[in-house]
Image (cartoon, grey):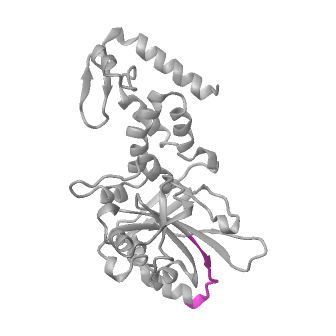
């Protein structure tokens, strides 16, 4: 057992035996609610029985900037900690790294994070790479997500949807002239989106060999469905027709493309897209280079 796991267990043991037997059950972070009485928590069979205050764990992880590798380690200690991580800690990581993006994704009545907070946290911090070019997935340093970029990935009839897309993560491929760019994104309220309605209306088939690298759900190929506008290639700086673009049933997007070499005139043209800086984009920091630490 790792030193971190031992320390966590000592922390839980001290909490359950100390505090003078106060008998406070698990509390939902930020909701203000609590379960009064340890007997009530025990009789309910709640997997979080014995964790006295989730606020304490949230404060500890806030002090280390919600390091994803440490969070993954703690979530593996027990079912109780895993449940707290899935319900509280991954959410707080997302809010701390991309507050405006999370606020936009959860705005509106009935809007929730489909696929769960762990999947969104992984999407914020983890580049899935490009299997076709033998590029492995990895934690990113800083990633920028933009809803202006997202509009470039929506067909004309779907422009009412809200989609955040990251800048491409560039990877050099041995023996290839051009680099491979891997990108990712997420829809708000995908189940009610026009994009999903178009996919269903066209009876687009779900892919049999590709799964979402963030939540494990089945995906549609937007290329096969004919829903990739030309503006996507222009936005990425990619060669026309050399782009893959998948969307899963939970609304997570991932894809890769072959990036064209930019000239000085191309760079001047790109300066006209400065509206990205004010469109509610998000900049996230991964904090680890170890792909095994992904949620």
Q: Residue 72 location, x and y as percent? A: 54, 39
Q: Residue 277 location, x and y as percent? A: 40, 71
- Compared to residue 237, the image places residue 256 above or below, namely above
Q: Residue 104 location, x and y as percent? A: 31, 60
Q: Residue 58 location, x and y as percent? A: 40, 35
- Compared to residue 294, the image places residue 207 above or below, namely below
Q: Point out the residue furthest to the left here.
A: 109
x 41%, y 15%: residue: 16
Residue 153, by quadrant, is: bottom left
Q: Quadrant of the N terminus?
A: top right
x 25%, y 36%: residue: 31
x 52%, y 43%: residue: 67
Q: Nearer the viewer, residue 19 or 161?
A: 161
Q: Nearer the viewer, residue 32 or 47?
A: 47
Q: State the extent of the magenta-drawn residues as a range.
A: 256-265
Check residue 168 for magenta coloring. no
x 38%, y 21%: residue: 49
Q: Nearer the viewer, residue 276 or 220?
A: 220
Q: Nearer the viewer, residue 87 or 247?
A: 247
Check residue 262 for magenta coloring. yes
């Amino acid at each position: 057992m790792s030193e971190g796991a031992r320390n966590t267990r000592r922390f839980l043991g001290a909490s359950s035996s100390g505090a003078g037997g106060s008998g406070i059950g698990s509390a939902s972070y930020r909701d203000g609610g609590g379960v009064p009485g340890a007997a009530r928590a025990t009789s309910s069979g709640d997997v979080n029985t014995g964790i006295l205050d989730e606020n304490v764990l949230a404060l500890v992880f806030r002090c280390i900037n919600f390091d994803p590798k440490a969070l993954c380690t703690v979530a593996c200690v027990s079912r109780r900690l895993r449940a707290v991580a899935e319900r509280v800690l991954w959410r707080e990581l997302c809010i701390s790294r991309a507050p405006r993006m999370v606020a936009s994704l959860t705005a509106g009545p009935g809007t929730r994070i489909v696929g769960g907070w762990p999947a969104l946290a992984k999407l914020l911090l983890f580049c899935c790479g490009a299997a076709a070019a033998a590029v492995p997935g990895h934690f990113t340093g800083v990633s920028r997500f933009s809803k202006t970029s997202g509009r470039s990935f929506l067909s004309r009839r779907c422009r009412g949807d809200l989609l955040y897309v990251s800048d491409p993560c560039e990877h050099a491929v041995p023996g290839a002239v051009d680099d491979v760019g891997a990108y990712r994104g997420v829809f708000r309220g995908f189940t009610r989106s026009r994009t999903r309605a178009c996919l269903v209306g066209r009876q687009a088939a779900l892919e049999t060999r590709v799964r979402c690298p963030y939540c494990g759900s089945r995906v549609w190929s937007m290329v096969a469905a004919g829903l990739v506008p030309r503006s996507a290639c222009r936005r990425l700086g990619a060669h026309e027709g050399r782009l893959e673009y998948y969307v899963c049933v939970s609304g997570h997007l991932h894809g890769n493309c072959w990036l064209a070499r930019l000239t000085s005139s191309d760079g001047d043209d790109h300066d006209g897209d400065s509206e990205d800086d004010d469109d509610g984009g998000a900049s996230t920091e991964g904090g680890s280079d170890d792909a095994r630490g992904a949620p």
